[in-house]
Image (cartoon, rainbow, N blue to C red):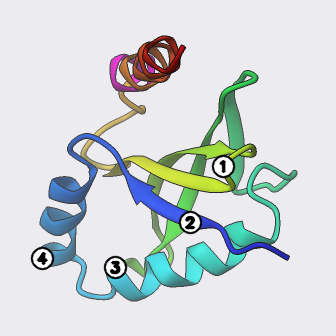
Amino acid sequence: MTAIRFEHWGPFEKEFDRLTRKFRTLPEDLERLKNVIALDPTGPSQHRTVLHRSEKACIVKGHLFCKTLRRDSLRIIYAYHEDRITIVWIEVYHKAGKANEDRARIAEYLRSLTNTHQKLW
């Protein structure tokens, strides 16, 4: 089995660092999530929802369970690229601070895939 690569896109790293200051266990929690996602990145789960599916990527919204929050969780948006066997973290947020994912950011990510693809040809 080939190992999945993990990357981040856009302001994800800055958001993650900001949330880590508030929720100290977040890096450890993300590592645990990586192990779960590696088994089946887009598979059926009550804790994940596919937001968009195309030939280039599958965009998934999932729960990031955080030990610091105890019975609560953060939301994480990621893209799974089956052809490259890569997960790209797009957004992470606490549902108390933000009701829904940033659809404009997801659309921008999908446009960036189209632009990258066109540049290659």
Write the start and end of the magenta stretch as one range: 103-107
Asked if the residues shown at circle 4 and circle 2 are in contact, with their CB atoms under 8 angstroms apart, the answer is no
Camera-nearest residue between 97 and 25: 25
Q: Nearer the viewer, mark 4 or mark 2?
A: 2
Query: Could you give the CA–CA distance between mark 4 and mark 2, rounded to whole angstroms?
Result: 25 Å
Question: Where, by quadrant of the figure, is residue 68 drawn?
Answer: bottom left
Measuring from the top left, give residue 33's x and y in whole percent: 58, 74
Quadrant of the image for the N terminus? bottom right
Numbered badge on residue 5: 2
Give the residue type that dot 2 points to. Answer: Arg
Asked if the residues shown at circle 4 and circle 3 are in contact, with their CB atoms under 8 angstroms apart, the answer is no
Asked if the residues shown at circle 2 and circle 1 are in contact, with their CB atoms under 8 angstroms apart, the answer is yes
Camera-nearest residue between 22 and 51: 51
Q: Can residue 90 be seen?
A: yes
Disc 4 target residue: 21
First in sequence: mark 4 or mark 3? 4
- Residue at figure coordinates x 46%, y 52% from the top left: 75
Numbered badge on residue 84: 1
Numbered badge on residue 26: 3
First in sequence: mark 4 or mark 2? 2
Q: Tell me: residue 23, above or below residue 120.
A: below
Q: Can residue 67 be seen?
A: no
First in sequence: mark 1 or mark 3? 3
First in sequence: mark 2 or mark 1? 2
Query: Could you give the CA–CA distance between mark 1 and mark 3, rounded to whole angstroms?
Result: 26 Å
- Residue at figure coordinates x 47%, y 65% from the top left: 73
Q: Secondary structure at mark 1?
A: loop
